[in-house]
Structure formats: structure tokens, C-alpha cells
Amino acid sequence: MPSTARRAILYLLTAMTLLTSFRLKTQKVVFFGDSLTQLGARPGGYILRMKDALDKKNIGSDYDLIGAGIGGNKVYDLYLRMDDDVLAQNPDIVFIWVGVNDVWHKTMYGTGTDAEKFEKFYTAIINKCLDRHIRLFLVTPAVIGEKTDYTNQQDGDLNAYCQIIRNLAQKFHTGLVDLREIFHTYELKSNPGNKESGILTVDRVHLNDAGNQLVADSMLEALLSK
Amino acid sequence: MPSTARRAILYLLTAMTLLTSFRLKTQKVVFFGDSLTQLGARPGGYILRMKDALDKKNIGSDYDLIGAGIGGNKVYDLYLRMDDDVLAQNPDIVFIWVGVNDVWHKTMYGTGTDAEKFEKFYTAIINKCLDRHIRLFLVTPAVIGEKTDYTNQQDGDLNAYCQIIRNLAQKFHTGLVDLREIFHTYELKSNPGNKESGILTVDRVHLNDAGNQLVADSMLEALLSK
Amino acid sequence: MPSTARRAILYLLTAMTLLTSFRLKTQKVVFFGDSLTQLGARPGGYILRMKDALDKKNIGSDYDLIGAGIGGNKVYDLYLRMDDDVLAQNPDIVFIWVGVNDVWHKTMYGTGTDAEKFEKFYTAIINKCLDRHIRLFLVTPAVIGEKTDYTNQQDGDLNAYCQIIRNLAQKFHTGLVDLREIFHTYELKSNPGNKESGILTVDRVHLNDAGNQLVADSMLEALLSK
Amino acid sequence: MPSTARRAILYLLTAMTLLTSFRLKTQKVVFFGDSLTQLGARPGGYILRMKDALDKKNIGSDYDLIGAGIGGNKVYDLYLRMDDDVLAQNPDIVFIWVGVNDVWHKTMYGTGTDAEKFEKFYTAIINKCLDRHIRLFLVTPAVIGEKTDYTNQQDGDLNAYCQIIRNLAQKFHTGLVDLREIFHTYELKSNPGNKESGILTVDRVHLNDAGNQLVADSMLEALLSK
């Protein structure tokens, strides 16, 4: 066999090895958040729905989806446990979905998070992830109440915190899944009666089937985008 | 003189007397509210601006404008003092402008007013006034923060309380000065930078000159409408 | 029959009539308050326990005990409904027991009552009752949490509001049932483990059997005192 | 010179060197906290008073006192900045004084800290310090209001958070400067009028001269104790 051919075969084998190893490399995706994510990892939850969708596309083995949600968590709770619950897993991709409790707990328990502190802790989380070259998706909190005319008690505050998150996504060049926007658009179509729950949530906050599906679709689109 | 003519003159005199007495009857107008109204009665305030406008139209003597605003008042404070401060004056017309503190004090002191209680006390005030055949104008709270994209912390709650007031105006067939709407329309034009104060307020809540003028114009239009 | 005898008999009859009419005059007692009083009118509640105790003393017919408690009521809610729910009944005696929600709702909903407003509305209620010559008993809120070392979250605030009530009782020369003090003394003896509920309450606030009995005993002692 | 003598001299020199170096080893003491500590580093503040007292005892050069206080800080703010502001300085001793804002901000802004989270973050701070073999002193928050009869609004909550800190000091065998207790004892003697400020604070929270001196004395005693 001439050396050119041998060399060609060698290149081919190398290329195949590289491609194979590339294909086999499973992306570890951690969903980091509060009760919405904790529930998202249960049957019917948005994480399992994403898994199903990936399986149907025959790329289920490319992604390892891991829920890291704990009920009641605010942004500083994520910061406190991120070493143990996220970084220790050495993820390739992290979705950060937090903010509902930071706003909601202000009037509910007097223990919400100041906007300035919210941004500070969120930034600290982002920096720690980017230090590890983790691909990040920031996710805006969707709703506390589904009324479409901005008469839900926390709408103003929630809009403000979403804006903080959008600004951070832009500043740090991360991905963004703007569920606040996505839910609002959906509600304008599907909630003509201006109901405060029952369209995408069961109780103004936690997702029903339609809500979990909408989150799954939105996150999946982000995950599979370039 | 034929009796027909005498009768005609008699009728004419009677009509003139009636018209005169009607013209002379000064309408007592009480502005019932919180610090915005308390300040409205001071130089530069909206009540004095209304007085000036009425004088310029040469109908200043038709109306006696009386400020009854006390800083920090919520709806139940109005109810508590309405006998002494409003009904005792035997007014013809009352503008009720309250709601900012009911919403604002929730996060500021933990002492806001539940929506349900807000409606209950507001209704009680309306009923007491209507029992006395007072002409009522309900006024929606304008702003807590002037940002136009509904990212002011209390926007959601404030919108909800405004909706309660609009519904009450409709239910009881009272006048309505929808300052929430009027301010929002104004801000969309005049606050392109999405500032939180300085356009119509000095501090997100209390009125600057432009704010006092806009309130004066809006209330005057309502007062002089049929 | 000699006139002296006739006169004696007449006096006797008159005296009997007077005594009878005196005995027959039933005192109407209204218990005016929040959920604690609403529950107090149910089987096992403190009002029914007072009724039983009066029956055992054979003076049950001397008192008509009427519950006028509504869950969630704060001092201004009492003021709003006092004409309909209390004065309309033309009571001889009123127990006013309010304050837990005024303090508790501050952190729970952001809708508690400022101390200054608490005193103002309480004073207005007292004045309306005293105008009608109603015998008043002011009752201090007992507990929000049963821990004895003043580490219950609202202890400081609750102590302050109780002090307002004690001062009002002194100022207006009304009766006082100082349940705050009575409960504290009881807990010091019976709650060595510093538990936050289970001694006199089921849930830190609402009364268990022992709590209802202690309230019944305390109010009865006040009612039957000179 | 005989070798024994030479060896003796050598030992002596070595011993002197060791003793000298030991004497010269300055202890770095960081005061880690909120506005009380930020102000404590200013003229008249408790840290400078401690420095003066050490100088008077001729041991001023043994200790390097460093303020690390930032206004408005809650326990999680300390956790966020402890690497940069405390550990980076490689301190031998750290006083942790935090808690006032965690309690106070509940009703003031709706952004206080849940008791459970307070303990969690405090524990995380302690663990990070103990990993570095830093000698720790936990300091209880002194007062929010100086009234002595536990009628300051936050007394109950503040007592509870102090108890959490005392328990942590015991659990982790750290030092404890129980300013809550120390201030209360002082106030019982020096505040017979039950005033809410002016004895040890200027405004119910921030220290006046007497307050700064009492804190300096208390911390110094702890620092110099075995």
C-alpha cells in the first residue's frame, strides 16, 4: 500500500475517532432553581418532558439532565449551595431559574431579597460558573399570578427582577430563556378571562401540565440552539 | 297692560330670580385624601391651581374648594374621620383620592391594606356620601414610581387597587378621575428614558409642578363635565 | 285590716316587684373580636364555657352571652361593623378582644396595623360604647407563640400593643382582662419546656381546651366582679 | 570556650529569638459586621476605643484591629464577601457581629432573613473560619430599641436570633460576646424611664459614646480572656 493511502486511512481513522468521541460526549445539564425546578424533576415535570422530547429526537443519550431545585430557594440560597449541588457535578450546561421567592416572600414573610442584593448574588453565581467555562442559560421567573393586565400583586416587582436578569444575560453573554415574556404572550392568547390561575399554573405559581410543557419546549429550544 | 303681558313679565321675573339664585348657589367641593391632597391645598398644589383656573373662567365664586387631606392616610383612616372632616362641612361634591399608602405601606411598614378590606372601607365611604346625596368623584392613585414599563415595585398591586376603584365607580354610578390611566398616557409620551421620578413627581409619589397641573386639569374637567 | 298592715303589705309587694324585676333584668353581654371569639362561641369555646359556669352558679338567666367575632378582624374592622354587630343589639356589657391580627399580619401579609392607628381606632370604639353607657372590658391579646422567654417573633410588638390597651383601660376607667399577663403567668408554670404551642393553644394562637377554660375563668371573674 | 558552654549560649540565643519572635507576632483581629462595625472603625467608634485601651495597657502592638463592616449587611452578605474581606487578610481572630438587619428589614423593607436561613448562613461562615483555624467570637445583636420591658417591636424576633447565635457558639466552641445580655443588664440600671433611645444608642440601633464604650469594654474583655 502506498504511503499516501496509508496516510489517508490514518487520517480517516483519526477523524472517526474524534467524531465518535465527540458524539459520545454526553452533555451534563443541571437545572438549578427553586420549587418549580424541584417539581420539574418529578413525573410530568418540565425536566422529564425535555428528556422525553430528546429521546423522541433520538438524541436522548447526548444529554444528561439533572434537577437541582429546592423549594423556597432564593438567589442567595443558590449561591450557598452551588459548590455542592452544581459545580461538584462538573456540568457542561446550567440553567439558572430563580426569582419568584425573592419577590414573593417580601409580603408573604417579610423575607424577600432587595433588588440590589438579588443582582449581586446572581452575578456571583454567574461568575463562578463562567470561571468553569459552563454554558449558562438564565431563566426569568414566569408568573406570580396569571392575570394579563398587570394587576397581579407582584407584577411590578417581578418585571423589575426579570429586567435585572435580562441585563445580566446581555452583560455576561449568556443564553436567556425569557419565560416571563413567553408566558405573557401565551396568556394573552389563552387567558381571555384574565384568570389568576389555571391556565399555566395550578396556584398562580406552580406549573400545571400546560405550564410544564411550555417550559420544557422553551428550554429545549434554547438548549438545541447554536 | 293686558293680563297676558303681566303674566309674561311675572314669569320672566320668577325665572330670573331662580336663575340668579341658582347662579349664586356656591358648590362646596371637598377633596378627601392623603398627603397628595394635603400638599394639594398648599401654594402650587392642585387645589389652588383649580381655584385659579375657575377664577380665570370667571366662575371662581361658583365653587368653594376645600382640602381635607392628611399625610399617611389609608382608606380606613378616611372612613374614621369622614364625619368630622367631610360630612360636617355639608359638601355638594367630594373627590375621594386614596390608595397609595394602602399599597405602599405593605413593604414599607408591613401595614398596608388587604385588597378585600380596601374595597369594603371604600364602599362604606361611598355609601355614607350617597346617603347624603353628595356628588362623588372617585380618583385612582396615580403612581408609585414613574417608570412606564410596569417595573415599579408596586405596579401590579397598584393596578389591582385602581381596578377596584374603577369597578366601584361603575357600580355606584359615581364620577371617575382615572389618574392612573391619565398619568400613564402622559408618561408614555414624556418619559422616554423610563425614569422613576422627575416627570410628574419629585420622589416617585409626591407631585411636582407638572404633576399638580395635570391633576388640576383632570379634576377640573371632571368637575365641569355634565 | 289596719292601715299600717295594709301599708306594710303594699311595701312588701312593691319590694318584691322591684326585686323580681331586678332579678329578671338579663344583662346582654357581647364578645366583640376576631377568630378567637368566633371560635369561642362554638362548642368547647370560652363563651359557652362561661355560660355553663353561670348556669352552675344558678345565675345563667341573668346574662345573655353573645358572640360577635369574625376571623381575621383587626381593630379597624371592629370599628367598621360595630354599629351593626354590637350597638344594634343594645348590649349592657361589651368585651373587646382584638390585637393579634393587627400585629401578626405585619409580617404575614404586610397588612398589620400601625401602633398609632391601633390606638386611634381602639379609642374610637371605646368612645362610641361609652356614649351608650355600655360597661366595657378591654382584653389584651394573649399570645402569638407560647414560648416564655420572649423569643416568639411578635413578642415585642405584642407587648407594646398590650401596653396601649392597658393605658386605654386606665384612661377611660374601663374593666381590663389582661390575658397577656394571665397567659404568661400560666405558661411560666406549665410550659417548662419553652414550647411554642400545645399548652394553651393548638397553633401558637388559637385556643385549645385549657386555653378556652383559662379565658372563660378570667372573663367570668371580671364579669362578676364589682 | 568549652563546647558545653558554647552549646548553652547557642540554646540561650535560640530561646531568646523564639521568645522575641513570639512577642513580636502581632495578632490580626478582624471585626466583621454591618453599619455598627463600619461606624466602629471611625473616630469614637468601638474599634478605635479598643485600640486606645490596648495602647494604655502597653500591648497595642500585639494586636492589629481591622474593621470590616458594611452598612445594611445581613448574614448572607457577610457570607458573600468573607473571602475577599476577611479570609484574604489571613486573620488570627474574627469577631462576627451581625443580625440587626436580618430582623429589622422584615418590617422595614420586607427583606429580612428567615431564622432557618440565618442559622444556615451563620453556620457556613463559622465553618469557613474554623477551617482556617481562626479564633472566633460570635457577638449577639444588642438592641433595636432600648426599652427594657420587651416592648420594642422586634424584641421577640431579636431574642430568638440571639438564641440561635448562643447555640452556635456552644455547638462550635467559639467565644461569645453576648451584647444582647450585656446591654439589657446595663439598660435595667441606666434606663429607668424605659426610653427607646439615648442611653446607649442615638436612634434605637446605632451606638452613642456610651454604647461604643460598652461594646469596646465587652469585646476587649473577651479578646484578652484565655
Image (cartoon, coloured by chain):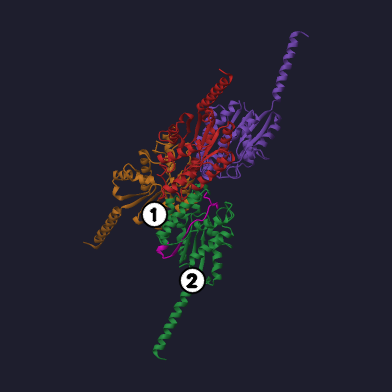
Chain colours: A orange, B purple, C red, D green
Residue A58 appears at what percent x and percent y?
28, 46
Mark 1 vs mark 2: tell me if same chain: no
| Residue tagged 2 | D26
Label 1 crowding class (10 Å Cα cut-off): few <14, some 14-19, many 20+?
some
Among the 4 quarters of the image, the one containing residue B6: top right
Amino acid type of the residue that numbered disc 2 sits on in the rendered structure: Thr
The location of residue B161, given as percent across then percent down, is 52, 36
Badge number at residue A82: 1
The main secondary structure of the magenta stretch is loop
Magenta segment boundaries in residue numbering:
D129-150
Mark 1 and mark 2 residues within 8 Å of each other at the beta carbon: no
Q: Chain of mark 2?
A: D
* Residue that sits furthest to the left in the current view: A1
Q: Nearer the viewer, mark 1 or mark 2?
A: 2
- Kindly give the residue lying farthest to the right in the view shown: B1
- Give the label on residue C71, or none: none
**B87 versus A156 height, above or below:** above
Q: Give me the chain letter of mark 1.
A: A
Q: Is residue A58 above or below residue D22?
A: above
- Name the residue furthest front: C2
Kindly give the residue lying farthest to the bottom in the view shown: D1
Instruction: For the N terminus of chain D, give its image quadrant.
Output: bottom left
The residue tagged with tag 1: helix, strand or loop? Answer: helix
Q: Which picture quadrant has residue B203?
A: top right
Q: Quadrant of residue B174?
A: top right
Which of the pair B56/A133 is nearer the observer? B56
User: Is label 2 in a helix, a strand or a loop?
Assistant: loop
- Within the magenta stretch, is there residue D130? yes
Amino acid at circle 1: Met
**Per the image, is A124 magenta?**
no
| Left or right position of A153 against A1 | right
